[in-house]
Amino acid sequence: MLDSVFALAQGFSVALEPTKLLFALIGVFLGTAVGVLPGIGPALTVALLLPVTFKLDPTGSLIMFAGIYYGGMYGGSTTSILINTPGESASMITALEGNKMAKAGRGGPALATSAVGSFVAGLIATIGLALFAPWLVEIAIQFGPADYFALMIVAFVTVSATFGDSPLRGLTSLFIGLMLGLVGIDALSGQARLTFGVPELLDGVEVTTLAVGLFAVGEALFVASRMKHAPETIEPVRGSLWMTREDWKRSWKPWLRGTALGFPIGSLPAGGAEIPTFLSYTIEKRLTKHPEEFGKGAIEGVAGPEAANNASAAGTLMPLLTLGLPTSATAAILLAGFQQYGLNPGPLLFAERPDLVWGLIASLFIANAMLVILNLPLIGLWVRLLAIPQPWLYAGILVFAAMGTIAANPSPVELVMLAVFGLLGFVMRRYDYPIAPMVVGLILGPMAETQLRRALQISLGDPMALIESPLAATLLAIAALALVAPLLFRGLSRFKADED
């Protein structure tokens, strides 16, 4: 633990450099802005910036990306409270009580408990990340090729099963990503695979092109196809922005309970931010001394879920930094950001680039402080962002996506691939296929293949080597359970429905 404190102190010396502070400020400002705008999440923003930042300083760029992630979690609550439209899926629960508070003239305290709760949760969860990440790294160092392969399988299955409503659709998306991961020169044999005689494909499919195409271009096309929407009514913030003594008294326990739920669940391969926010809301509803207010604007129903939401963001970074496993769409794009600079998150990164890892963790404390300062005084600015016409917004996104891709890879083939992935993203969004598993498949697929082939080479081709390690066998059993559980639950629910 003492080593972690020293490493974190060194991280602060990196994060407090003027250029790094500027990157953090840009990140949290952009993150809050995109969190406020419905439909434009941190994943889309980071994907858009990947090709633009490929020649910048890796530490500064990753600090900015992490700031966007944290800021997106903060900003999503503003639209949930003021117009009942969550900017992020994890902010859906906040809308239940937050919008009712705004309609009752208590939008200020709702925004305040959201901002302060997010700060408290982010601070505690980032301390947890700094303390527990080295411990997880020590465990990960002992992994063999078979253990790593099993871990990748857990990531594939959990991401596919938990994103979207249908595990089959998630697996289909993953399979397309794995197929794209096969394109290029085979690392072991040196043979070209699935390149169809196109020289630009010899290096494989660029993750940035896929991410920008699916998230940015696909989202823009999807929004354009659904332009006939009723205008949102923005609830004005009336009265004081600050909380009364009673509001503080009713908020601090939900903040702590939300943090206790969000950080560990966010750290799990199948965690994410949605589960802890739902759990937090349910717990606060049961523990409240004011049950009559729930459904009419209970402050606990805003404080707890918002704390859980932000704590899960720090939790998501734990498996990403220590094991290289993304557990959310934004984490998958952040992983692409690391790989853009030739960095592979995992145990070796802590040894090879401690300045980058600990500088990034230290910057999260700074980003958290910046966010609470930005969110409350500038609430009027964030609300004005909602007045930007959608055609302008998404036209700008399309131009930015094309320019960024061309700047990173000046090739007509890359632009054609961007258009193809954009159309694919639109079709997937239209028919409710999750996008994140495809990005995870492209990033982790080649790594899983390498570990599988290493394990088989060591065992001279004996497939039983994949389950001889107790850890690998346990992880594969977890993966099998994660795959079968949603199908069992669905079958049981249908059976009960038929009985009724």
Image: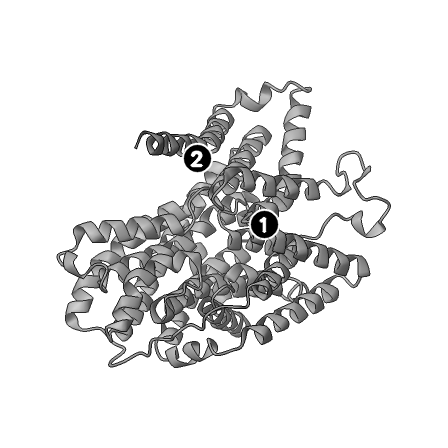
Q: Nearer the viewer, residue 468 or 92?
A: 92
Mark 1 highlights which residue? Answer: 352
* Total count of labels: 2
Q: Amino acid at mark 1?
A: Glu
Q: Amino acid at mark 2?
A: Pro
Vertical relation: 108 (above or below) 165: below
Q: Residues within 10 Å of mark 2 (few under 14, many from 20)?
A: some
Q: Is residue 300 visible?
A: yes
Q: Position of residue 390 (x, y in %)?
A: 55, 73
Q: Is residue 171 left or right of residue 480?
A: right
Mark positioned earlier in the residue sequence (2 or 1): 1
Q: Is residue 341 visible?
A: no
Q: Secondary structure at mark 1?
A: helix
Residue at 62 percent across and 52 percent down: it is 427
Which quadrant is the C terminus positioned in?
A: top left
In which image quadrant can residue 452 be found? top right
Q: Is residue 376 left or right of residue 243?
A: right
Q: Identify the image's colour scheme: rainbow, by chain, secondary structure or one colour.
A: one colour
Residue at 40 percent across and 75 percent down: it is 374
Q: Position of residue 259 (x, y in %)?
A: 31, 54
Q: Position of residue 120 (x, y in %)?
A: 31, 62
Q: Secondary structure at mark 2?
A: helix
